[in-house]
Image: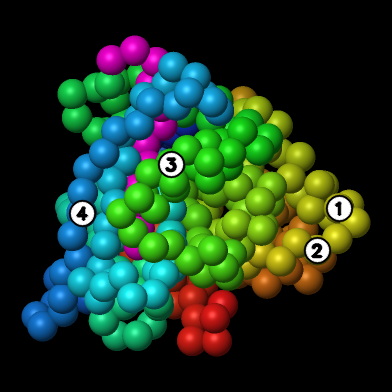
Amino acid sequence: MRYVSLLTLITIVSATGTYAQEGKPEVRYDLGADSKPQEGVPKGTISEHEWTSTKAFPGTTRRYSVYVPKQYNGSKPAALMVFQDGHAYQSSNGDFRVPVVFDNLIHAGDMPVTIGVFIDPGHKGELPKKRGWRPRPSNRSIEYDTLSPTYSDMLINEILPQVEKNYRLSKDPELRAICGISSGGICAFTVAWERPDQFRKVLSHVGSFTNIRGGHDYPAIIRKHPEVKPIRVFLQDGSNDLDNQHGNWPLANQQMAKALAFRKYDYKFVYGDGGHNGSHGGAILPESLRWLWRDHKNGR
């Protein structure tokens, strides 16, 4: 179910700034039962952390948090899912509410026992007083929009070793997923593209596969790459997404879907009529995760 606001002016926050789209009603989607706390479902715990990078992005400090499901007891490694712009995915009153969705889906057996890592972009200098989209500037676009292995290097070699000091994470790339919204969406794809030996499941919400830092090249790269990489990709976008000097987001995501289809990747593309926000992606998050983890009982 969805509803359309009477607003005709939408202020949109993206990787590159704030945009006002005139003449387009804001489309919002309702959250379902799997995105709300349910009686009798065990609740995981969340711990907060900070990390100062000394290698990949020297001098940047970021916050991250770790969700641990109630079912985790350390007897065997847990699956892993990493979220860029972690504050947006972790929030208990936002569009995604991942810890609640994880609680419900893990309890139902629809996904494996999974530890979630919610990472925010790095800042040079003092961190903001609380997690969120402001203040800027941050190191977000450099980290997320750049087509290189640098961010995956930080994730794999700096952040995850900190998490592994306290928890056992599976080394099986089939049990590792990565997710993000906007520039975080293209970042998630880049991590899996560069390091399929580490991550093989991607979830992108309104991904910025546009020419912010060369992301518009991905469809051609996918089509011409000599091998099909062993990754599974879920793309979500909407017809009212951004259209600006960097490109057209709906067209860019359709081009990505066509390229993945051409090379016969394991992918799914859900196209709605939402804008550059998490409303549609949050509403379909439970089903997106079920699709990504659909054969987890076979170790995938």
Q: Which percent across, then down, holds residue 103?
A: 24, 71
Say whether residue 224 is magenta. Answer: no
Side of 4 relative to 137 (left or right)? left
Residue 122 lies in the magenta stretch = yes
Rendered image quadrant of residue 269: bottom right
Real-space Cα separation, disc 4 to disc 3, in angstroms: 16 Å
Say above or below: 101 vs 213: below
**Residue 103 in the figure: left or right of residue 202:** left
**Dot 1: what SS?**
loop
3D distance between C-alphas at marks 3 and 2:
28 Å
Q: Nearer the viewer, mark 1 or mark 3?
A: 3
Of residues 152 and 193, which is closer to you in this image?
152
For the residues marked 2 and 1, what is the alpha-carbon distance in whole angstroms? 7 Å
| Residue at 47% in and 38% down | 158
Q: Tell me what residue is drawn at x 30 percent, y 54 percent.
A: 166
Q: Amino acid at mark 1?
A: His
Residue under label 1: 225
Res 168 seen here? yes
- Looking at the picture, how far across and down is residue 186, in whole percent? 58, 44
Quick one: 296 or 222, which is closer to the camera?
296
Q: Which residue is mark 3?
A: 159
Residue 237 visible in the shown view: no
The label on residue 160 is: none
Q: Which residues are magenta?
A: 115-126
The residues tagged by marks 2 and 4 sit, at their Cα atoms, a distance apart of 36 Å
- Residue lying at the far left of the rendered structure: 39
> Where is 299 relative to 282, above or below?
below
CA gap between label 1 and label 3 equals 29 Å
Question: Residue 228 shows which numbered tag?
Answer: 2
Where, quadrant-wise, is the N terminus in this rendering? bottom left
Amino acid type assigned to the residue bearing label 2 in the image: Val
